[in-house]
Image (cartoon, grey):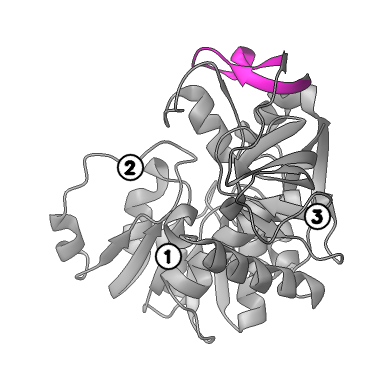
Amino acid sequence: MAKRIQFSQHGGSEVLEYRDYQPAAPGPREVRVANRAIGLNFIDTYFRSGLYQPPALPSSLGTEGAGVVEAVGSEVDGLKVGDRVAYATGPLGAYSELHVLPADKLVKLPDSISFEQAAAVMLKGLTVQYLLRQTYELKGGETILFHAAAGGVGSFACQWAKALGVKLIGTVSSAEKAARAKEQGAWATIDYSHENVVQRVLELTDGAKCPVVYDGVGKDTWETSLDCVAPRGLLVSFGNASGAVTGVNLGILAQKGSLYVTRPTLAGYATSAQRLQAMADELFGMIASGQLQVEISNRYALKDAAAAQDALSSRQTTGSTILLP
């Protein structure tokens, strides 16, 4: 038997339960991982609330973690018991002491990266990798807008953008978060609690706006983001922190300058084991070179996952939060 967090109905953090369960034996192409650290992410609250649907209830939570291979299926190549591994693309079940998942969802973890670092960086760091290196391949010299620049994903985006020679304008909700984003590498910040984001973007770009805007907030920032995109530029809507964007009138893209919009996901880019490992290798290389610092601001015991999610949802956190089994 092992312990895990699960839920039997959708709702707030109060639906999360810390329960005994019997982990399955790995199938032919699966691996069982003994988790050493587990990542906490906004997407976990989407599954819990019902915004995203889990395969069935009761369900566990979490798609990100790091640990040691405990058992391998009969057809698994390239991984063996004792290997250090990390994962970020599901299936659900990372909020557990033991997790069974397909071998092609795992990456090998170099000795230079700790389990805690991997659990804190895999989902957010791979997200920044595909956003800045693939969805819109930044070359350096661009001025971009990134919402929630002091959060987990935003902090890595600030660092990676600076390493690429990109001027990142980050939106934040307080002077403290503005200072944090600047420390992480943001070129400029806009405090939306008292500044007009569109007006400040126009001022900072001499009226040119941004070739790409990265928006993980969703509903609350949709219109603002569109107004910050340069003609024929790209709005990358990659998250729903304030709720999903719905009822979109495509005509607005014409009115605001023949704009492009994409709604990408990590799973849409990490489409094979080879591609996932290549993305992770670039991420790990950024950490090893010192260009990307992994800050773990909060550690919670696995049994306290509800409190950890509450802190995340109320935007009390900066940097990364991990759960420890």
Residue position marked by numbered label 1 in the rendering: 213
* CA separation in Å, label 1 and label 3: 39 Å
The region drawn magenta spans: 2-19
- Residue under label 2, please give it: 245
Label 2 neighbour load within 10 Å: few <14, some 14-19, many 20+: some
Q: Are marks 2 and 3 in contact (CB under 8 Å)?
A: no
Q: Position of residue 209 (x, y in %)?
A: 38, 73
Q: Is residue 270 left or right of residue 111?
A: left
The quarter of the image holding the C terminus is: top right
Q: Which label lies toward us, 1 or 3? A: 3
Q: CA distance from mark 2 to mark 1?
A: 15 Å
Within 10 Å of the Cα at label 1, are there few (<14), some (14-19), or many (20+) other Cα atoms? Answer: many
**226 vs 21, nearest the viewer:** 21
Measuring 67% from the left and 39% from the top, which residue is drawn there?
A: 40
In the picture, measured across the screen, residue 323 lies left or right of residue 187, that is right
The amino acid type, in three-letter code, at marker 2 is: Val
Percent position (x, y) of residue 145?
A: 48, 66
Q: Is residue 10 magenta?
A: yes
Q: Image point 41% across, 48% down: which residue?
A: 221
- What is the crowding at mark 3: few (fewer than 14 residues within 10 Å), some, or many (at least 20)? some
Question: Quick check: marks 2 and 1 in contact, CB under 8 Å?
Answer: no
Quadrant in which residue 52 is drawn: top left
Along the viewing direction, whichever of 110 and 314 lies nearer the viewer = 110
Residue at left 47%, top 65%? Answer: 200
Q: Secondary structure at mark 3?
A: loop
Query: What mark, if any, has residue 83 been given in the picture?
Result: 3
Residue 237, placed above or below residue 245: below
